[in-house]
Amino acid sequence: MLSQSTGRIESREVVRLSALPDEDRARGNLYALLGRLLAGPPDDGMLQMLRGIAPEAGDDSLLAASWQMLAVAASRTDQESLKNEYDTLFIGVGRGELVPYGSWYLTGFLMEQPLARLRSDLRELGIERQPGVHEPEDHAAALCDTMALLITADQPAPLDQQYGFYARHLEPWIPRFFRDLQQAESARFYRAVGQLGELFIDVEAQAFRVAVPAAGAAKST
């Protein structure tokens, strides 16, 4: 039974409704937002939502500042400009400025061993691509979607399982991808997306090191 879905991946497991702490809901929503923005340019409704972002009073963190920069970037663009920017960055003629796939970042080639390992882990988690989605599962958008699903499913994955997936399939390359996105020649709106992504992933890494003993041990060795 298909019971839980984002735009590109879905869970095949039957799950039960459970309460989700506000912090985890925020984490999941941010992963889902990054997945949506990396999968394609935002539509008008999402642009309006992004333009209305305002940090909480007294929050002077770098992550809050990156949210504010995303709101400013959204206010300075429109759908046609975003489509052109996205196409240049990620599609291009033959390929875009960036290749947003884990296999490419880790091996220099597409459809390599990192993708095979990812597909094996996804099968064990009961997660698969949605019908009609053609990009490999190691696309940055799909990986963000998967993390969102692990965190916010009706029965969320345990934190150590979330960390295991993050450590195997995002941590080795996606911080570098977000830095490259900020530095890409054609990035305007997406420069702010890259900054938000990099800072959020850094916060995730620090939180995992505190909350998951295996994460802290791996970092210290």
Image (tube, rainbow, N blue to C red):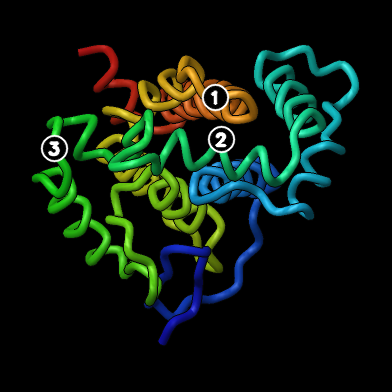
For residue 89, side relative to residue 113 (left or right):
right
Secondary structure type for disc 3 = loop
Q: Indicate the quadrant where residue 26 lies.
A: top right
Of mark 1 and mark 3, the one earlier in the sequence is 3
Image-based side of 203 in relation to 111, left or right? right
Q: Is residue 102 above or below residue 193?
A: below
Q: Residues within 10 Å of mark 3 (few under 14, many from 20)?
A: few
**Residue 85 position within the rendered picture, expressed as x and y whole percent measured from the top left:** 56, 35
Image x and y of residue 203, in percent: 53, 23
Which one is earlier in the sequence, the residue at label 1 or at label 2? 2
Residue 16 lies in quadrant: bottom right
Please report contact status of discs 1 and 2: CB closer than 8 Å, yes or no: yes
Q: Residue furthest left?
A: 113
- Cα distance, mark 1 to mark 2? 7 Å
The image shows residue 209 at horizontal and vertical percentages of 40, 24
Q: From the viewer's perspective, is 104 left or right of 149? A: left
CA separation, marks 1 and 3?
23 Å
Q: Quadrant of the N terminus?
A: bottom left
Residue at the image point whose x is 30% and y is 28% from the top: 173
Q: Is residue 24 visible?
A: no
Does residue 178 appear to the left or right of 106 in the view shown? Answer: right
Question: Which is nearer the eye, 138 or 205?
Answer: 138
* Residue highlighted by disc 2: 85
Alpha carbon separation for disc pair 3 and 2:
24 Å
Quadrant occupied by the C terminus: top left
User: In percent of the image, x 68 and y 21: which residue is there?
Assistant: 66
Residue at 27% x, 21% y: name it: 217
Which residue was labeled with disc 1? 187
Q: Tag 1, which secondary structure? A: loop
- Give the SS element for disc 2: helix
Q: Nearer the viewer, mark 3 or mark 2?
A: 2
The circle on residue 109 is 3
